[in-house]
Amino acid sequence: MLHYLKFANYFLSTMAGVTAILFAQHWILLGFAIFVVFYVLGDAFFGEDLSQPELNNKALLNIMLYASVPTTMLLLAVSLWLVTPYDWAIMQWLSATSAYDFIAAKEATNAFEIGVALVFCGLMLSGVATVVGHELIHRIGNKKAVTTGRWLLAISFDASFSIEHVFNHHVHVATEKDPVTAKRGTSVYAQVPLAIIRTSMAAWQIEKKRLTRKKQSIFSFHNQYITGWLMSVAWLSLATVLGGWQGLLFVTGVGIAAKVILEIVNYMEHYGLVRHPREPVRPRHSWNNNRRISCWAMFNLPRHSHHHAKGAVPFEKLEAMPDAPIMIGGYISTMLLVLIPPLWFSLMRPKLQHWDKTMANEKELEIIAQQAQDAVERKEKRLALIKSLHPMRFIQIMLAMMKNPIKGNNR
């Protein structure tokens, strides 16, 4: 039973986070700090989970997955309560019947605490909605699962993830055609906006081709890219009804934060790895992580190498793959590292060198060499451009123009 219940730890930590948001003020800061420290230190001190138990109780596993829906609803409700100008009757009752004045606490919450709450809620949403949504959209033969996953992902404006991730990312991972595989030397700040744009474009093109093949209208409800955005509009409409324009802005911010966190995770799961497009995906083509707390919190998503080698395998059957390339640390700690590019690059350089030496084949080494050469050429072009824009060069150009003015027609 422990191997089932271990996946409930994220729901417990989310409930603790929701409580901190509900109590508002400094409790938000304290809750956020405890949340981050728990996952960073938990991964650091509790080691790896290499177990491969047979979990055959599908009903219990599904209950744990679909429990993300009411948990997400509660998270959004508390988020709206924090910023809404309205005093909900249930909160008036709770304040009147308890020793804590929730209404006064909300009114005393300052802008900084609300900003931290936005990031905190985005982080929790990415775990309870994005992670579960990712698992469900892979069950392409189960309409209920895919639809539920899309609704969960729509909160972070990413219902089209069900299109691009399954039919593009998993096909082209670690190649030039994959929008979320960052090349070596690319910072997370450069990669995230590009990934968001390119994955969206890829999803549209995939749907366009599918509907054209089926001879259905592209601009219709048959288009899952369009219906995905309508799902997001529905969530924002509900937020507006319950929380006013303040609720709309806050939920929008939380959704954007969750989407950015997803792309940061994509970045650290695939950074710097390459694959020849004609060769099959192997466990070595993505960074793996068997840290106990991360795996338990994310329904084994950190066992990413097996997930990419066999994308249809459900989370409970993902194997540890200890021989796959291993990520620097747990998921939260690695997310913090990528936010400091010089530190991230220095830590990843020896790991990539080890991958090149022990895992890459000749074709992949050729791709790496070509990428390195392209990077040098791009750097030289940037330096040449900067040099051409130097103030002294500008003055030289202006003086040359004064000596040799352009002669126009006299009218």
Image (cartoon, rainbow, N blue to C red):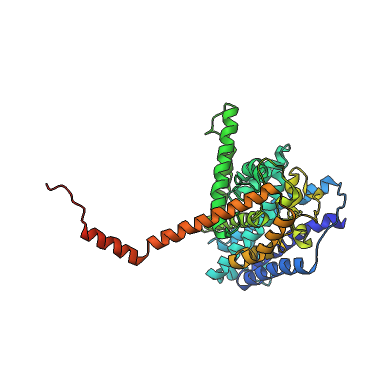
Determine which quarter of the picture holds residue 16. Answer: bottom right
Query: Residue 387 or 294: which is nearer the viewer?
Result: 387
Hey, which residue is sitting farthest left in the picture? 411
Give the farthest residue toward the top. Answer: 215
> Residue 146: x and y, percent?
69, 41
Give the image location of residue 322, x and y in percent.
80, 56
Q: Is residue 269 left or right of residue 2?
A: left
Does 267 sit left or right of 297 as displayed? left
Q: Residue at x 68, y 56 (%)?
A: 127
Q: Nearer the viewer, residue 407 or 73?
A: 407
Q: Where, by quadrant of the figure, is residue 296 drawn? A: bottom right
Please name the residue shown 58% across and 62% down the image.
118
Q: Specify whether residue 21 is in view.
A: no
Q: Position of residue 243 (x, y in %)?
A: 55, 56
In the figure, 157 relative to 163: above or below? below
Task: Pick the quarter of the image with the N terminus.
Answer: bottom right
